[in-house]
């Protein structure tokens, strides 16, 4: 049976670096996936993932074990991503997105289109490769804090309680941000599917 | 597409519904609505498809990365962590308790046994009554059993301290047995002398 995170953290605190390597190996893939979803660029996502682990190690004294190790690790990762995005936006002279300024978009493109075309098993979909790329573009349109919630929910499968703890926001905010993020991503994907459908002239998969 | 006004209150609940984060009563309400609303059923299917797609999309992207050297690169950037001494002691003790409980209990039992012997020796030893081993003695009285035939044997050291033994001079009645031939009278006398002791 794999050693749990807290035991590994304790071992790291006694100077056992191998224990930290185990933690890195355990979370590297998921941390990368979240970072990639946030910043889109593969190299930058790898750098951010490494930086997140280095930071976690550096500030291990601050981790008291009140929450799970992974919520702390994801919080650090998301914060690094948000900082990186803000720096880029500032360099480009763009205005920083206000995370609560999203209005409820009730104009839905085509209800049920996504579900009927993809089902819940996207591996079977012939569109999967193209859609995987489209997902990246769709995520980019979502405000960074909403994107973070969506990614943590989908990649890590975090509960709303964990999301609330990780991002230090009330549970109600988690719910509303997740709703807005999904609505936006859905709209883009549906539009893409409609476009694809009209191009190929296919009604179904 | 025109939005059904009845759906307005349900739409924000569909996302937590898909995530299994609604309270049981809310869940029942949404399920009832879904049973009669095709649009919301479609929305739920969309949410599920989208969720699976994001997961799958990022999985595919992560598959393209070779993580073989990732951990090594991270480890190369670390400065060895050295926690405070007290924290190290605490962690070591707690780990001993978790993983080496038997060894720890054996050590504690050993330590307890040593203390159980050492403490009485040190504490009680001081109040040991004066005896032969003590150099200073004071003879308060010398008594013998009534009618006993005893002879006091006084042993005096160079400082003038004395040990007085009451030695019975009574001959023990032994069943007649053939005495060894080579044993002299003196040896026989010593064998038959019985030290009774006395009060000092």
Image (spheres, rainbow, N blue to C red):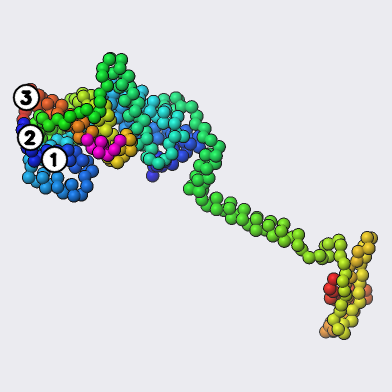
Task: Say whether residue A146 is left or right of residue B94.
Answer: left
Disc 2 chain ID: B
C-alpha separation, residue under disc 1 versus residue under disc 2: 11 Å
Measured from the top left, where is residue A15 in percent x and y? Answer: 50, 34
Callouts 1 and 2 on one subunit: yes
Mark 2 nearby-residue class (10 Å; few <14, some 14–19, many ≥20): few
Q: Is residue A32 visible?
A: no
Pick the residue in front: B139 or B192: B139
Measured from the top left, where is residue A179 in percent x and y? Answer: 20, 35
Given this view, does label 1 or label 3 mark the residue nearer the observer? Answer: 1
In the rendered image, which residue does mark 2 sit on? B3
Q: Please give the name of the residue rendered at 50% of the width and 45% of the height, measured from the top-left corner.
A: B94
Q: Please give the name of the residue rendered at 76% of the width and 59% of the height, measured from the top-left corner.
A: B126
Measured from the top left, where is residue A54 in percent x and y? Answer: 42, 28
Kindly indicate whether the residue at mark 2 contacts the one at mark 1 (C-beta within 8 angstroms).
no
Indicate which disc, 1 or 2, sits on the residue closer to the N terminus: 2
In the rendered image, which residue does mark 3 sit on? A198
Mark 3 nearby-residue class (10 Å; few <14, some 14–19, many ≥20): few
Query: In the rendered structure, which segment of residues is drawn in magenta?
Result: A169-176
Q: Please give the name of the residue rendered at 16% of the width and 49% of the height, measured from the top-left corner.
A: B28
């Amino acid at each position: 049976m794999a050693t749990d995170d807290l035991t590994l953290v304790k071992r790291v605190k006694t100077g056992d670096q191998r224990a930290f390597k185990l933690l890195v190996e355990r979370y590297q893939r998921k941390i990368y996936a979240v970072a990639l979803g946030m910043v889109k660029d593969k190299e930058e996502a790898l750098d951010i993932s490494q930086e997140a682990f280095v930071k976690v190690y550096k500030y291990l004294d601050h981790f008291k074990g009140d929450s799970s190790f992974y919520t702390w690790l994801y919080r650090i990762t998301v914060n690094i991503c948000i900082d990186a995005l803000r720096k880029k936006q500032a360099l480009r002279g763009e205005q920083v997105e206000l995370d609560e300024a999203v209005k409820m978009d009730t104009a839905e493109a085509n209800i049920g289109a996504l579900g009927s075309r993809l089902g819940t098993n996207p591996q079977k979909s012939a569109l999967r490769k193209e859609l995987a790329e489209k997902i990246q573009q769709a995520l980019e349109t979502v405000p960074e804090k909403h994107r973070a919630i969506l990614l943590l929910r989908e990649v890590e499968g975090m509960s709303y309680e964990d999301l609330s703890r990780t991002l230090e926001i009330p549970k109600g905010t988690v719910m509303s941000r997740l709703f807005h993020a999904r609505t936006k991503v859905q709209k883009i994907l549906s539009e893409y599917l409609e476009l694809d459908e009209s191009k190929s002239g296919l009604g179904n998969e | 597409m025109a939005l059904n006004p009845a759906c307005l209150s349900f739409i924000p609940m569909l996302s937590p519904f898909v995530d299994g984060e609604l309270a049981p009563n809310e869940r029942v309400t949404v399920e009832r609505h879904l049973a009669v609303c095709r649009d919301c059923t479609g929305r739920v299917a969309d949410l599920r498809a989208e969720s699976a797609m994001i997961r799958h999309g990022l999985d595919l992207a992560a598959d393209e990365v070779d993580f073989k050297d990732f951990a090594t690169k991270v480890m190369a950037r670390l400065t060895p962590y050295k926690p405070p001494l007290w924290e190290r002691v605490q962690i070591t003790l707690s780990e001993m308790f978790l993983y080496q409980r038997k060894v720890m209990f054996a050590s504690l039992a050993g330590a307890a046994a040593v203390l159980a012997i050492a403490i009485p020796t040190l504490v009680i030893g001081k109040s040991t009554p004066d005896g032969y081993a003590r150099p200073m003695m004071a003879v308060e009285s010398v008594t013998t059993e009534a009618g006993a035939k005893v002879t006091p044997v006084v042993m005096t050291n160079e400082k003038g301290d004395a040990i007085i033994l009451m030695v019975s001079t009574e001959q023990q009645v032994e069943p007649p047995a053939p005495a060894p031939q080579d044993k002299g009278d003196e040896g026989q006398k010593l064998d038959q002398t019985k030290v009774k002791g006395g009060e000092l």
